Image: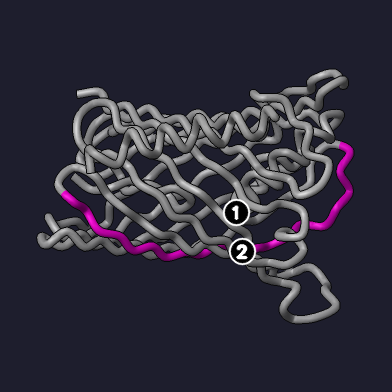
Amino acid sequence: MKMIRMKSVIAGIFIFLLPFVVSAQSFLLQDVPADETKLGFRYLRPDFKEGDGLTFLSGVYDFSVSIPVGSKVNIVGSLPFGVIGVEGVDTESGIGNIYVGLQHRLNSTAEKGLSASLGIFLPTMPEDKFSVFLIGVYSNYFEFQKFFPNTLTVYGNLAYHRIKSNGWMFNLEIGPNIMIATGDNDADTEVLIHYGLSGGYRVHDVAFKAELAGMAILTEDVDEFGDRFAHMLAFGVQWTRGPVRPGIFYKIYLKEELRDVVSGVIGIKLDVVLK
């Protein structure tokens, strides 16, 4: 019943935003570098196919910040936080792996831009929070390095965006995730590639977007070639003007092993731009 109420509330928010229907920000992919300081919040709630008795507040809460330190460079960071509770069972919560990095605008005009990012996910995820690990991975598989305990991840990203004057938008990104074991973790270093593309259309101050994101494992042994890949699709809407910019989206997994567990993920996003 609580899940039904959650969906009703989110559907109401979506209907509220539609009448209100600058560059739009992303749901899964990396945001376009901003010229002003920006605070970000994102809430992800997975809909498990079986045994879904999650409490109302269960999900992943992702807090982020982007601070310009010049005309071309931003300091960026994020703090993920997972909460999982089942009716009749104690709630477990904990932080994930904190991210710190730099985002550099290599080339930018009014309609298009190229940016590069480099940073690390620090091994701040507690190793005794297995339930938090699960809610984190199933909520946000595209960034599962945020919830791997005893793991430091070196993250790189190269992104291209284009925003046409007629309202059409296009984004493309690719980069490595190098996951290095720390502490008592004796796992081998793994190298993965994340990638994604998005397209959308802006109507006045509201952007409608669809994003396809993927992850490929390069170093781990797998039974079949297709097992190296996992893809996900998200679509949603976001307000793009003013200091407060809310958005809502829905994500589905295209990989069968993930789709068998999670029907989809509902996301709420809020960006606050400080002038």
Horizontal side, residue 85 vs residue 230: left or right: right
Along the line of sight, which residue is nearer the eye, 8 or 28?
8
Q: Which residue is mark 2?
A: 215
Q: Residue 175 at what x, y percent from top left?
A: 51, 62
Q: Earlier in the sequence, mark 1 or mark 2?
A: 1
Q: CA distance from mark 1 to mark 2?
A: 7 Å
Q: Is residue 198 magenta?
A: yes
In this view, 88 is above or below 180: above
In this view, 121 is above or below 220: above
Horizontal side, residue 153 vs residue 134: left or right: left
- Label 1 with label 2: CB-CB less than 8 Å: yes
The amino acid on which the numbered mark 1 sits, given as a three-letter code, is Phe
In this view, 34 is above or below 180: above
Circle on res. 142: 1
Magenta residues span 184-203
The residue at 86%/43% (across/down) is: 185
The residue at 61%/56% (across/down) is: 177
In this view, 86 is above or below 224: above
Q: Residue 33 at what x, y percent from top left?
A: 30, 45
The residue at 11%/62% (across/down) is: 166
Residue 232, quarter of picture: bottom right
The amino acid on which the numbered mark 2 sits, given as a three-letter code, is Met
Q: Residue 96 at what x, y percent from top left?
A: 67, 32
Q: Residue 240 at what x, y percent from top left?
A: 24, 40
Along the line of sight, which residue is nearer the eye, 275 or 185?
275
Instruction: Give the dominant element type of the magenta stretch: helix, strand or loop.
Output: strand
